[in-house]
């Protein structure tokens, strides 16, 4: 019989105590600033971009985080807050302002929008201090650790939730984060990732949830059915007693997660909920899917999952496990595109990518971890000391005042080098392909899964490029807003601006060039990504 989560932590905690007593310092690798784009349900309802396009500030205390929120022009002014160091009760105080509503015992994101909080440098640890999102929208939390948040004992914070959302929350993306406790409710802890009271369009990706009695819930009671449209993918749930998650009403999509040592129950679909459960790996666990602790049933659609040493209890009045041979009892369709890794490789790919300070690595859909672009996509042009100055000349134009300059919308002369190249990107919408941008056919196109993303053209050996031509598909002209052109290998910004068409820059020898869309007025459709040597 498995021991409860708290008992099995004792050996690990003892090892950590010895390390601390010996003065051992565990360092973490430098982390990139917020990278990649939202996935899953967070791409819907207008998408989730956080503080993209706004000011970027650095904070090393909780008070500084609150000051950054309160110092904005309004509660919706975009901002990216880069966090480094340990954030705790000792350095977190309430700050007042017209653009914020903060508290001293938690990181408070209340009645605000368009915010990114991202761990950088040596790492960001929220120690015994939870993150509370209330009546807010368009929030990104990336590359942070939140640990040991208590609802009883001392100190207390956020009702015991590592990250908690409630009251009309929309569009939240939590990515590459580590959420952990040191026991269950009897030790003073509650949920790691809770959503209630009308919280919708949330994605939790590439994260670790461990050592807790409760993984998280969607809906606080059987009558709280206003929550839903939640995606969980490429996460590790380890040493959790139950609620991975508990889902009351609504729809949730779980794919490519690794569930390990679920001690009492796992995905608990109840009160009319629908769970889509694809290509997950369940290991050394009990009752990983079903309706538990209630007679108000939920449903599930299952496909491609692996059950490795999973045990199942007998059905009862308040207990309806899906196993020992789980079958679908509903049909769930999702509105976004996604690529499934094979369930057999989920433990290895999740181990290499999930959690804070993993370099923001993601899977390419073929069980191979990939590093993101080494640049910060929230900065439209890091080479420009004042990107808000409209009088800045085009740095690629030797004489921007010369009226004889050719029309930049004219197609370049010479050979389109993309026709013999490969292509890949950050994501792709259903029915589109990366290869469509270098096939010479204007009737085919690539679109990102959301409104922003990146598309790359690549060669097997170094190729000199000094000009590209981005050609939008018919009917989508003008959708592309701000962009950056990158040397993919180095992250160097070759050009930045807005709109499609011909883009010139100093000749550069590279193997991969990336066109990164950082803002759009709709869903971009790129028919051709042409590249030219001169």
Image (tube, grey):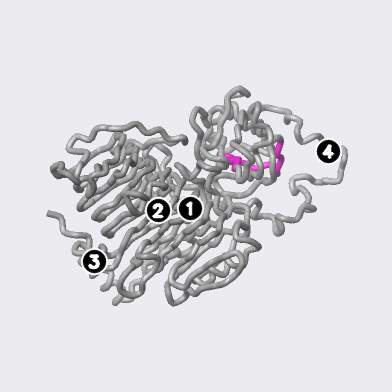
Rendered image: mark on residue 195: 2
Real-space Cα distance between discs 4 and 1?
50 Å
Of the two numbered discs 1 and 2 on the same chain, state the one appearing first in sequence.
Answer: 1
Instruction: Say if mark 1 contacts mark 2, CB within 8 Å.
Output: yes
Instruction: Give the quadrant of the C terminus.
Output: top right
Q: Which numbered disc, 4 or 3, marks the residue closer to the eye? A: 3
Q: What stretch is highlighted in magenta?
A: 502-516
At a point 47% along the width and 36% down the height, the residue shown is 336
Of the two numbered discs 4 and 1 on the same chain, state the one appearing first in sequence.
Answer: 1
Real-space Cα distance between discs 4 and 2?
56 Å
Q: Which numbered disc, 4 or 1, marks the residue closer to the eye? A: 1
Which residue lies under the disc numbered 4?
405
Is residue 514 rendered magenta in the image? yes
Of the two numbered discs 2 and 3 on the same chain, state the one appearing first in sequence.
Answer: 3
Is residue 121 rendered magenta in the image? no
The crowding category of the residue bearing disc 2, from other C-alpha atoms within 10 Å (few below 14, some 14 to 19, many at least 20), is: many
Rendered image: mark on residue 169: 1
């Amino acid at each position: 019989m498995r021991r409860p989560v708290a008992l099995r932590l004792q050996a690990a905690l003892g090892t950590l105590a010895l390390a601390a007593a010996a003065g051992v310092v565990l360092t973490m690798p430098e982390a990139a600033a917020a990278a990649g784009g939202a996935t899953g349900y967070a791409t819907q309802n207008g998408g989730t971009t956080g503080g993209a396009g706004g000011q970027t500030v650095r904070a090393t205390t909780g008070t500084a985080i609150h000051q950054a929120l309160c110092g904005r022009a309004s509660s919706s002014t975009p901002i990216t807050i880069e966090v480094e160091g340990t954030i705790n009760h000792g350095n977190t105080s309430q700050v007042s302002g017209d653009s914020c509503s903060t508290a001293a015992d938690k990181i408070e994101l209340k009645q605000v929008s368009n915010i990114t909080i991202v761990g950088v440098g040596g790492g960001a640890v929220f120690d015994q201090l939870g993150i509370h999102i209330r009546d807010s929208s368009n929030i990104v939390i990336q590359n942070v650790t939140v640990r040991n948040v208590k609802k009883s004992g001392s100190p207390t914070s956020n009702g015991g939730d590592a990250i908690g959302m409630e009251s009309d929350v929309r569009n939240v993306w939590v990515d590459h984060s580590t959420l952990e406790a040191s026991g269950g409710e009897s030790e003073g802890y509650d949920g790691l990732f809770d959503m209630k009271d009308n919280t919708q369009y949330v994605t939790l990706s590439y994260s670790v949830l461990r050592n807790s009695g409760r993984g998280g819930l969607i809906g606080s009671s059987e009558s709280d059915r206003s929550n839903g449209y939640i995606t969980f993918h490429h996460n590790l749930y380890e040493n959790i007693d139950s609620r991975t998650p508990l889902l009351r009403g609504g729809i949730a999509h779980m794919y490519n997660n690794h569930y390990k040592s679920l001690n009492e129950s796992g995905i608990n679909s109840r009160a009319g909920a629908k769970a889509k459960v694809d290509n997950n790996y369940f290991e050394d666990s009990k009752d990983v899917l079903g309706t538990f602790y209630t007679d108000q049933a939920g449903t599930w659609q299952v496909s491609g999952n692996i059950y490795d040493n999973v045990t199942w209890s007998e059905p009862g009045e308040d207990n309806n496990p899906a196993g020992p041979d789980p079958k679908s009892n509903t049909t769930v369709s999702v509105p976004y595109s996604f690529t499934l890794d094979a369930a057999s490789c989920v433990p290895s790919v999740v181990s290499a990518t999930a959690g804070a300070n993993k370099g923001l690595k993601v899977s390419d859909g073929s069980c191979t971890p990939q590093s993101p672009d080494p640049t910060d996509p929230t900065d439209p042009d890091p080479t420009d000391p004042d990107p808000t100055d409209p009088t800045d000349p085009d740095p690629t134009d030797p004489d921007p005042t010369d009226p004889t300059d050719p029309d930049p919308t004219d197609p370049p002369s010479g050979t389109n080098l993309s026709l013999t190249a490969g292509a890949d990107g950050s994501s792709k919408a259903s029915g589109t392909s990366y290869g469509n941008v270098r096939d010479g056919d204007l009737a085919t196109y690539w679109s990102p899964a959301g409104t922003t993303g990146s598309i790359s053209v690549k060669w097997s050996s170094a190729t000199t490029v000094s000009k590209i031509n981005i050609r939008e598909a018919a009917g989508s002209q003008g959708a592309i807003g701000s962009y950056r052109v990158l040397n993919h290998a180095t992250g160097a910004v070759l050009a930045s601006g807005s709109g499609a068409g011909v883009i010139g820059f100093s000749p550069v020898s590279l193997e991969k060039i990336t066109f990164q869309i950082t803002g759009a007025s709709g869903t971009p459709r790129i028919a051709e990504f042409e590249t030219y040597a001169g």
